[in-house]
Image (cartoon, rainbow, N blue to C red):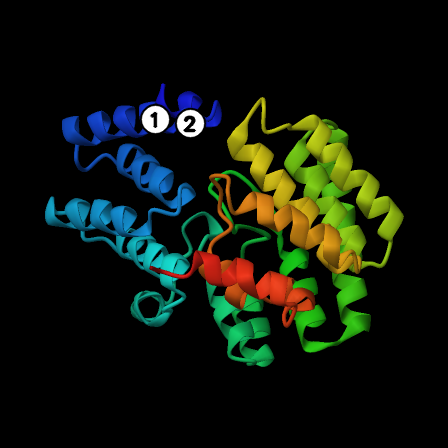
Amino acid sequence: SGYITRRRNHWPEAERDFSTAVALDPRNPNAYNLLADTYVLQRRFPEAVQTYERVMDAGERTPIVQFRQASAIFNGTANSKPLREVLAKSPDMDVAGGQTPVRVLFALIDGNYAEAERVLAASPRQDFQDIDFSFYFPKAWFEGLIARTRGDSGRAIAAFSAARTILEQRLVVKPEHARTSAVLAQVDAALGRKELALREAEHAVELMPISRDIYDGVLVLEGLAQVYTWSNERDRAIELLQKLVKMPGYINYARLKLHPMWNPLRGDPRFEAIVASLAPK
């Protein structure tokens, strides 16, 4: 019930339900991940970290629990050291493809594009969880992101075109899937198809309004903000981000401060003020 309650934007009730579930079974990953994720979505990162600390005290000192705790530290503070250490200790960990994108991100932050390409190519997977637990990005999406970040427009276009084909195939199966439509819009923005990207992103928002589902609705709105960012619509991107940081969601300090997707906004005092507003107090 907490899962549905959360999507309906009833956060105290969701937190109560998940806390009760964890109390009944402290080693149930469904319960403790949903509780910690509820704190993460509200940007209450210390409480997410404490949740995983209690899980480890109960005997669940597994690499994935350590990864999720270190992720909460990173997202709230932009301190990547604990998360890098966890990844280094478990080089083969890739639960649901959730660790490869983080390794790629750290390589991009370090400006080590060869390492980003190596990490991605080394994974046998063809799709990966990135922001949340429910959507899988095609491998070609990350290939495009790496190429775009290093300034290789030819390879970026080839990779994003491949990603586009995969996302279009998904939409044949599920034509009204808002998240897929939102990511397709980001791909089209990367391909320079501005008007098409804006239409697709706005359609995704219509399919998944925050009034119906705050969880997916905000993720779709973040997709629209990224389309604005990649389409040279800086004012609209910043205006939307100013609203998004006041809503529960996965936009956080580390993501805005370090992720290359937001590079076009860097240096704008309004964007830097948004980043600073998320810094740990």
For the residue pair 244 and 260, the one nearer the viewer reads as 244
Q: Residue at point 42% right, 42% down?
A: 41
SS state under label 2: helix
Q: CA distance from mark 2 to mark 1?
A: 5 Å
Q: Is residue 94 visible?
A: yes
Q: Residues within 10 Å of mark 1 (few under 14, many from 20)?
A: many
Three-letter code, disc 2: Arg
Mark 2 or 1, nearer chain start = 2
| In-image side of 203 versus 254 (left or right) | right
Three-letter code, disc 1: Ala
Indicate the position of residue 126 as horizontal and vertical percent values.
Answer: 60, 52
Q: Which quarter shows the N terminus?
A: top left
Indicate the position of residue 82 as horizontal and vertical percent values.
Answer: 30, 68
Which residue is the site of mark 2?
6
| In-image side of 129 versus 89 (left or right) | right
Indicate the position of residue 207 as horizontal and vertical percent values.
Answer: 70, 27
Q: Which quarter shows the C terminus?
A: bottom left
Above-or-below relation of 18 to 154: above
Q: Residue at point 58% right, 22% down?
A: 212
Checking the image for residue 14, the label placed there is: 1
Indicate the position of residue 206 as horizontal and vertical percent values.
Answer: 72, 28
> Residues at badges 2 and 1 in contact (C-beta under 8 Å)?
yes
Q: Residue at point 62% right, 56% down?
A: 139
